[in-house]
Image (tube, grey):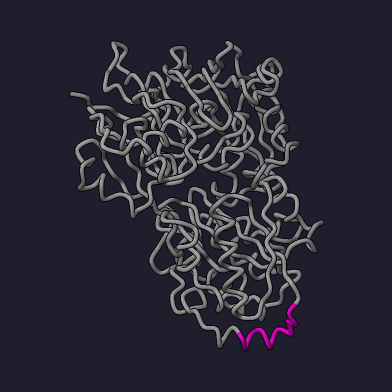
Amino acid sequence: MKKNTLSKAVAMGLAVSMAFGSTSMAASGTILDNGRYEKLVVAISEDPQDLEGDDVNVGSRYYWIYGIYESLFDFADDNSGELLPCLASGYEEVDDGASWIVTLNDDIYDWDGNNITSSDVKFCFEWMINNGQAIRFDYFDSIEVIDDYTFYIHWTETPPAISEVEFPLVRTLIFSEKAYEDHNGMTTDPCGTGCYIVTEFVAGSKVVMEANDNYWGLDHDELSGRHTATVQTLELDVVSEASTAVIGLETGTLDVCSYVPLSMLEEFQTGSQSEDYTVEILTQGDFWYFAPNAQTVNEELRRAMYYALDNETICTAMGGSYTAATTLGTEAFTDYDESLELTDTYVTEYDLDKAAECVEASGYSGETLTLICVNNEAAVAAATMIQLLLAQAGINIEINAVTNDTYNTITSPAYSDEWDIMINTLGGSNMVGSWHLMMDNEVNNGLTFSLIEDDTLQELYETATADATHDAEHMRAVLDYVVENAYFYPIAKISSGLVYTNDISEMFYREGYYTPGAATFSVE
C-alpha cells in the first residue's frame, strides 16, 4: 500500500491543492467485499470539455471513454488487428464483402434500462456523420435496419482490410437515441452502456465514475478483460502540467499518470518513491508529422523545408515526452519493422546548404506561408520552433493555431488557400492503417488530407493496405515514394513514463493506451 509522502515544501503542497481542489489522499489500498479496489485517482492531461460520445480520438479520452460508451467491435488484446465481439456478436459478409450483416447482442441495456437496438446504431452513425466527426468513414455508405438486432452495413466497395474500416467498427461509440434525447445530448450528463457510470463531471476539473453493477457485459465471457470494472470509484483529474502530476504522485493525491516525462522518472524507478510505484516506458502508436499543402507548395520548396528542419530540436521544444521520429509511425504499431526507418534521407539530414539550393530552385521569393496547427501546448511549441528553423533558410512562416473543429474545416479542399503547411498527429491499430489521411485520395474527393493528387501514391498505398500484400516490402515502397516526392516529414513520437501505484499488479491496454479501470490489484 502506498505511503503518504509529505516531504515537499509547503509551497508544493499549495500547488497540489490548487491543481486538484484538495489534498485528500487517493488510493485507499482496500479491496472491498465485492472484490473491487475501493478508489483510484488517475491524472488526465486534457480537459474533456464534454462527455458526448462523438469523438473517441480527442486527447486523453482514449484512456477511459470506452468505460462509458462502447462500440460494435473491439480489437484483440494481442494487438493483432483481429476483431473481437463487443456490442455486436458477429458479422457475415454478403455481396462479395460490399455489405455486412451485423448481429447485435440482444441483452444490451444502458444505465437507464434502454435496450440498444439496430435503430440506435443507425442513429449514432448518422449523428456522427452529421456532426462532422465521422473520421475515416470513406468506405462507409449506410446502415439498413433488418430487425431489432440485425442490420446491414453497406460499404461503398469491399474494404481491402479491417484497418480501412476500423473507425466505423471500433471507434464509433453507440448509445440509445432515447437516452440522447432524455439527457440533452449527454454533453454533461451521459448515459452509456459501459462498465462504469458517471456520477460527477466538472469541466476542467474531473470526471468521477462508479462501477456499474448492472453492466450487461457481466454475462459475456467473450468480451476483452478491458471491459471489467475492477475499481469501485474511478476518478479522473485534469492535470495539464506533467510536473504538477508528478507532485500529485509524490504526495499521494494521484495514483496513476501516463505522461510523466522520462527526465522525471528516476525518483519512481530508483529513488524515494520506488517502493510505492511501478514504472513502464510507453511508446504510443501515435506520431506527429509535417505536411506542406501539395496544391500551394511545390516539391523543391517542400524539400527545402525538410533540410532546414531538425526534429530533435523540435521535440526538445515540445517537451520531455517527445522523441524524434525517423519514419511515419512508431515501433508500437503491430506491423512496424526496422526496415521502415527513413535513415539517410532528409528526415535525418539537417543541411542548410541543401535547403538554400532547394529554395532557389523552387522559385520562392520570400512570401509568408501559413502553418496551421491545433492550439494545444505541444503543437504550438512545435510550430514556433519550426518557424525559427525555417527562418534560417529564408522561409517565412506565420502560425495559425486553431481549435480541433476549425482545423478540420480549414484543411478541407474548399479552404486550400488558407494554409500552406500543417502539423498533424495520426495513430491507429497499425502503421499502414494510420496512413489513411495522408495517402488515400478518397479523403477529400480525389485529394489526400494535405491535398495530394497522385495516382501512383494511391496505388502503392492501396497495395500496402490490402491484406494479401500488407508487408514491410510494400510499406517500404510507399515510404520511398513519399521521400522521392517530398510529401511528408515525420516530427515526433511520444515516449513517456506510465507511473502507477504498486497496488496495481497488471494493467490492461487498448492499442498501447492503458485502461486503469480494468487493472488487476494485489493488496497485502
Residue sitting nearer the eye, 474 or 312: 312
Residue in view at x 44 percent, y 65 percent? 324
Residue 97 % position (x, y):
62, 43
| Observer-nearest of 204 and 110 | 204
**Residue 182 rendering spot, x and y as whole percentages:** 69, 15
Please name whichever residue, 332 or 65, is drawn nearer the observer in this view of the structure. 65
The correct choice, above or below, for 409 with respect to 355 in the image is above
Measured along the vertical axis of the image, is residue 323 above or below residue 144?
below
Residue 75 covered by magenta stretch: no
Judged left or right of residue 214, residue 403 is right
Q: Position of residue 386 (x, y in %)?
A: 58, 68
Membership of 364 in magenta stretch: yes
Q: Quadrant of residue 519?
A: top left
Q: Quadrant of the C terminus?
A: top left
Residue 505 in view of the camera: no
Which of the 4 image quadrants contains residue 461?
bottom right
Please state which of residues 42 and 216 is positioned toward the viewer in this rendering.
Answer: 42
Q: What residue sits 40% from the left and 40% below the top?
A: 245
Q: Which residues are magenta?
A: 356-366
Whether residue 437 is visible, yes or no, is yes
Report the number of discs.
0
Q: Quadrant of the N terminus?
A: top left
Left or right of residue 482, residue 445 in this image: right
